[in-house]
Amino acid sequence: DAGVIQSPRHEVTEMGQEVTLRCKPISGHNSLFWYRQTMMRGLELLIYFNNNVPIDDSGMPEDRFSAKMPNASFSTLKIQPSEPRDSAVYFCASSLQQGYNSPLHFGNGTRLTVT
Amino acid sequence: DAKTTQPNSMESNEEEPVHLPCNHSTISGTDYIHWYRQLPSQGPEYVIHGLTSNVNNRMASLAIAEDRKSSTLILHRATLRDAAVYYCILRRNSGNTPLVFGKGTRLSVIA
């Protein structure tokens, strides 16, 4: 299996532009998580889905952030408009909701720089 | 979520065992103890998890105190590739809940 695939690996954009980050979970996994990592705040959960349905989006920082999961094999995290403080590494993770405590499998992240 | 406390950093010599401690004095009966690690420029990866009994897998061993208020991740022979940030996380046993990461322990391995 290729693992969780995120694209792009790096994104540089100007303040005010729309940014879309993409994630392809591991085939067969039915839970998907979006995290953000910065030096100051560490790894923070933004939102997670079970069976394509958003379960908890309380970590989404502002209305400028939105996430969708139109099907089991694809999710997007959109920031519109982007701001310099959104600069971070964004990770997507997936797991199999089979029983409890299934491990999360993380992608290698998208490093976002907003200038 | 119950809180965990880990040392900020630790150092080990290559090919020696490493014991990474974690305190979780407010752990509840339904909390599992999970360990993840994050290698440089990569996403976190699962290492091991347990509830009450000690656990072994190909990556590491997990020793859990009898009162469950602390645990230790054991790397039996550290290699340079084990240099990473190690996170000890409590995860409630109630469905596929997310992980809540703390600051972790940064492990340096010296050749």
Image (tube, rainbow, N blue to C red):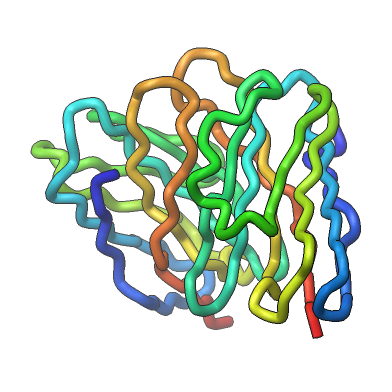
Q: Residue at x 53, y 56 (%)?
A: B37
In the depicted view, which residue is nearer to us: A33 or B79? A33
> How many numbered tags mark residues here?
0
Rendered view: B39 above or below B97: below
- Vertical placement of B79 versus B90: above or below? below
> Quadrant where the N terminus of chain A lies?
top right
Give residue B102's position: percent from left, percent from top. 39, 61
Q: Is residue A37 left or right of residue B27?
A: right
Q: Residue furthest bottom?
A: A115
Q: Give me the residue at 48% from left, 14% from top.
A: A99
Q: Position of residue A45 (x, y in %)?
A: 53, 50
Outermost top residue: A99
Decide if residue A39 is on the left or right side of residue B2.
right
Is A88 in front, or is A54? A54
Looking at the image, which is closer to me, B26 or B15?
A: B26
Residue lying at the far left in this picture: please name it: B67
* Residue at the image point whose x is 87% and y is 80% from the top: A14
The structure residue drawn at horizontal position 55% and vertical position 33%, both measured from the top left corner, is: A103
User: Quarter of the image containing the C terminus of chain A?
Assistant: bottom right
Query: Seen in the image, is B47 located left or right of residue B6?
Result: right
User: Which x, y percent locates residue B106?
Assistant: 46, 73
Residue B110, image x, y percentages: 53, 82
